[in-house]
Amino acid sequence: MENDKKQKYYLILKIVLILGAVTLLGLWLWFSPPGVFGKADAIGYAVCHQIAERSFTIGERKFPLCARCTGMYLGAFITFVYQLKRKRAGALPPRKLWFFFGLLFVLFAIDGSNSYLHFFENAPSLYEPNNTFRLITGLGLGMCMAAVLYPIFHQTMWDDWIDNPTMHSYVDILKLILYTIVIFFIISSENSIFMFLFALLSTGTILFMLGLIYTVLITMLLKKENSFHQVSEIKWLALTGFCCAIAQIATMDLLRYRLTGTWAGFSF
């Protein structure tokens, strides 16, 4: 009898969750700008300043994210894909690689700070910032983010996670660097097909990462760590995490739109 009550409770909870997710997604799709690129713009609108001068373009169409954010989420995407070959590896990179990741973070901070100072007339700066530097340092930080988030997800979710890092040595780092160099040169070539693909990949990675983070947080709040063995067992947690990601983006979109009255990027 108690079991039946629990099953009914979970069934009701699942129905409410599905209806909530569909409603939330539907409202966001309805009120955000039309078209695939319009939705990508709306995702970028929630997390990026979208300043035209600091963004790449496809013809006359501005990217949904600035050059730095584009690099950051593309770097994260590449690193996530690279780590897939080591399934359920939940250990952080070994200490011998921390210097490299620390260096990437420092370079990102230096270039970001230097770029920010150029908003102020006569402010001191180290060098003239440009979108090439923004893309490179963004790619580096994205690698750092995914190198941490991927193992944290596995060590939180699975009962059979492997205490093994996804990246063992500088060979892994060199491979990742080669992949990011390829991305860099493709973007530099300004091929419209690849630029369109990268624009959508970078914004899609925002949703993916936010959903992953919320899934981990919800799992911890429910005290369900290391309770799962199959992907099918976490589908409701993942759906909830995705709902939270959409809710965050929708909330940020609403606040920014109420503040600025436009879907356009900031102008300085």
Image (spheres, rainbow, N blue to C red):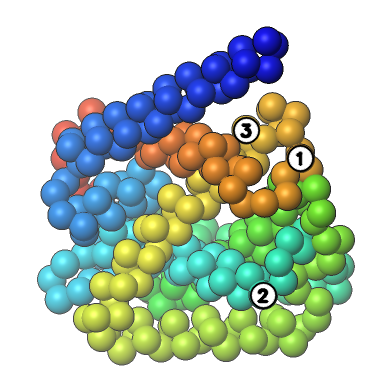
Classify residue 39 as left or right of residue 171.
left
Please provide percent x and percent y for residue 167. Answer: 75, 74
- What's the distance in space between the residues labelled 3 and 2, CA to CA? 26 Å
- Residue 104, quarter of picture: bottom right
Classify residue 151 as left or right of residue 82.
right
Residue occupying the point 57% across, 37% down:
237
Q: Secondary structure at mark 2?
A: loop
Disc assigned to residue 3 = none
Tell me the kind of residue under disc 2: Lys
- Crowd rating for badge 1 (residues with CA inside 10 Å; few <14, some 14–19, many 20+): some
Of circles 3 and 1, which is in front?
1
Q: Secondary structure at mark 1?
A: loop
Classify residue 231 as left or right of residue 86.
left
- CB contact under 8 Å: marks 3 and 1: no
- What's the distance in space between the residues labelled 3 and 1, CA to CA? 13 Å
Disc assigned to residue 85 = 2
Dot 3 or dot 1, earlier in sequence: 3
Dot 3 or dot 2, earlier in sequence: 2
Residue, far front: 1
Residue under label 3: 218
Dot 1 or dot 2, earlier in sequence: 2
- Crowd rating for badge 3 (residues with CA inside 10 Å; few <14, some 14–19, many 20+): some
Disc assigned to residue 227 = 1
Residue occupying the point 69% across, 27% down:
222
Residue 150 against residue 181 in the figure, above or below: above
Q: Quadrant of the N terminus?
A: top right
Q: Secondary structure at mark 3?
A: helix
Tell me the kind of residue under disc 3: Ile
